[in-house]
């Protein structure tokens, strides 16, 4: 049932895409990514994310992000400014359902300058069971690109998908981006707790 929920959200997003677009209209662009978490003393789990954009319109579906066995569907609006220094922001609103459910306003923002980049996404989940269960989720990265396609940096996240002794997970990352594929490896909490390893594989289309 959980997989069917995510598939249903993806199908609903795809159904909004027109079969053909006029030349003066923006085309659809999309991406799919899977982050696999290897948490100490726990079973590994995957968190897939699907995104679709057409001009300013942004659609997104997530699974195992807010919590295990939980899916979310999002709609947002893309904003961007700048060239040498680029800034992009996407305010969003999402519905969360499954083992955890509620309504969540959220955002995705990025800032780029030459070889440096900052990315952050977050949401505040208003949990259906009451305000005491509400929670702020976040994922942020700061990166430097020493070579074309290669990036290294630091990251931090706040989540309830798994538990450690740290409320704020933190770690290092190394990644490579090609024309369509992206691979990133993360090592979290090294030196503070038993490390969690995260592998991310994404494709754009």
Image: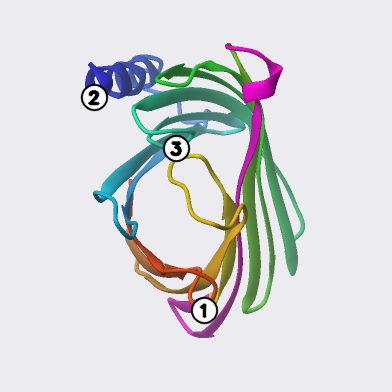
Residue at 44% x, 40% y: name it. 161
Q: Which mark is residue 191?
A: 1
| Few, some or many residues within 10 Å of mark 3 (<14, 14–19, 20+) | many
Q: Which residues are magenta?
A: 129-152
Q: Earlier in the sequence, mark 1 or mark 3?
A: 3
Q: Which mark is residue 52?
A: none
Residue annotated with mark 3: 65
Quarter of the picture containing the N terminus is top left
Residue annotated with mark 2: 3
Residue 86 appears left or right of 5? right
Q: Are marks 2 and 1 in contact (CB under 8 Å)?
A: no
Q: Are marks 3 and 2 in contact (CB under 8 Å)?
A: no
Residue at 58% x, 12% y: name it. 129
Residue 96 appears left or right of 30? right
Residue at 33% x, 40% y: name it. 48
Secondary element under disc 3, as helix, strand or loop, is loop
User: Residue farthest to the bottom?
Assistant: 146
Q: Is residue 135 magenta?
A: yes
| Few, some or many residues within 10 Å of mark 2 (<14, 14–19, 20+) | few
Q: Earlier in the sequence, mark 2 or mark 1?
A: 2
Rendering colour mode = rainbow
> How far is disc 3 from disc 2 in space, using C-alphas?
13 Å
Q: Is residue 56 visible?
A: yes
Q: Position of residue 194 (x, y in %)?
A: 42, 69
Q: Is residue 103 magenta?
A: no
Q: Earlier in the sequence, mark 3 or mark 2?
A: 2
Q: Is residue 124 visible?
A: no
Secondary element under disc 1, as helix, strand or loop, is loop
The front one of 158 and 179 is 158
> How far is disc 1 from disc 3 in space, using C-alphas?
25 Å
């Amino acid at each position: 049932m959980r997989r069917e929920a995510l598939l249903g959200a993806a199908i609903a997003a795809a159904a909004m895409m027109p079969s053909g677009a006029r030349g003066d209209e923006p085309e659809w662009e999309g991406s799919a990514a899977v982050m696999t978490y290897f948490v100490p003393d726990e079973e590994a789990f995957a968190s897939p994310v699907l995104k679709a954009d057409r001009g300013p319109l942004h659609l997104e579906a997530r699974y195992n992000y807010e919590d295990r066995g939980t899916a979310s569907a999002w709609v947002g609006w893309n904003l961007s400014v700048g060239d040498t220094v680029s800034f992009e922001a996407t305010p969003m609103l999402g519905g969360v359902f499954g083992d955890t459910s509620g309504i969540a306003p959220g955002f995705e923002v990025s800032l780029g300058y030459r070889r440096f980049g900052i990315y952050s996404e977050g949401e505040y989940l208003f949990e259906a069971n009451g305000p005491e269960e509400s929670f702020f989720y976040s994922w942020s990265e700061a990166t430097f690109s020493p070579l074309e396609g290669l990036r290294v940096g630091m990251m931090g996240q706040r989540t309830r998908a798994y538990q450690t002794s740290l409320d704020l997970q933190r770690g290092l990352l190394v990644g490579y981006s090609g024309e369509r594929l992206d691979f990133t490896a993360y090592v979290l909490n090294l030196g503070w707790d038993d490390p969690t390893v995260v592998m991310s594989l994404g494709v754009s289309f």
